[in-house]
Amino acid sequence: MAIREILEVPDPRLKTVSEPVEPHEFDDDLRSLVEDMFETMYAAPGIGLAAIQVGVPKRVLVIDLQEPDEDAEPVEGEDGVERYPAKNDPRTFINPVILDPAEELSTYNEGCLSVPEIYADVDRPATCTVHYQDLDGNEHTEQLEGLLATCIQHEMDHLEGILFIDHLSRLKRQMALKKLKKLRQAA
Ligand code: GNR
Ligand code: NI
């Protein structure tokens, strides 16, 4: 297992359209890519990661919303505030396809590990169906809602070379990129 480097804007590789994982590619290399993607995502920390964000142009996504586990005992954080520990729910989506997105939209204040420290509201279909393969190549279809629906659509965009800032107006996108440049100069 290894933490891999996350590509950041304006790296042109983030604009790549990723290639499907072929039937003969469901092997140990794919498993170690997915393991590394989880390790990289947890370390960041983030709730999702597309393979292209670590420079691999393949249609592979990992997601773990790490939502608070309300069935567990609260634990005290560094700030002295008690919180529920995160519930681990690692999900792997290979060759995902989104079907019947809802007409109803929901808005999330999105961020992206490839556009660090920039957050903006993005509207996306509130629910959708995803068809995908797991690491063994088995096919699944699932109905998604809430943050999971938003996150998978954000990750699917990466597979098409699209970033969440591409959903903003040109002015807002330029403002976001300027802010990022400034933050980098200050660092
Ligand atoms: O960590 C992440 N948080 C997030 C918040 C709202 C909507 C989407 C995301 S995904 C992001 C990690 C990332 O960049 N995945 O590509
Ligand atoms: Ni992202």
Image (cartoon, rainbow, N blue to C red):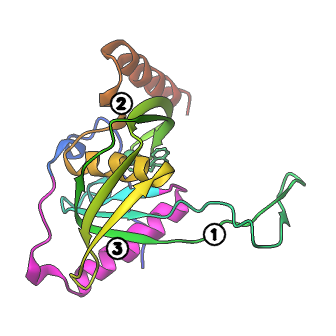
Residue 24 in the magenta stretch? The answer is: yes
The image quadrant where one finds the C terminus is: top right
Asked if residue 2 is positioned above or below residue 65 in the image, the reply reads: below
- Work out how far the residue at label 1 is from the one at label 3, CA to CA, in angstroms: 19 Å
Asked if residue 7 is positioned above or below residue 5 in the image, the reply reads: above
Residue 15 picture location, percent across and down: 19, 41
What residue range appears in magenta? 18-47
Specify the label residue 3 is tagged with.
none
- Work out how far the residue at label 3 is from the one at label 2, CA to CA, in angstroms: 26 Å
Can you identify the residue that label 3 sits on? Answer: 34
Callout 1–callout 3 Cβ contact below 8 Å = no
Q: Upstream in the sequence, badge 3 or badge 2? A: 3
Residue 100 picture location, percent across and down: 25, 49
Relative depth, front residue between 64 and 145: 145
- Compared across the picture, whether 179 is left or right of 11 comes to right
The image quadrant where one finds the N terminus is: bottom left
Can you identify the residue that label 1 sits on? Answer: 87
- Work out how far the residue at label 1 is from the one at label 2, CA to CA, in angstroms: 29 Å
Quadrant assignment, res 135: bottom left
Can you identify the residue that label 2 sits on? Answer: 165
Q: Upstream in the sequence, badge 1 or badge 3? A: 3
**Ligand 2 within 8 Å, label 2 CB:** no
Q: Amino acid at mark 1?
A: Lys
Q: Nearer the viewer, mark 1 or mark 2?
A: 1
Residue drawn at (49%, 32%) of the image: 118
Asked if residue 79 is positioned above or below residue 42 in the image, the reply reads: above
Q: Nearer the viewer, mark 1 or mark 3?
A: 1
Name of the residue lying farthest toward the right? 80
Helix, strand, or loop for circle 2? helix
Tell me if mark 3 has few (under 14), some (14-19) or many (20+) residues whose alpha carbon lies within 10 angstroms of its own: many
Residue 68 picture location, percent across and down: 68, 61
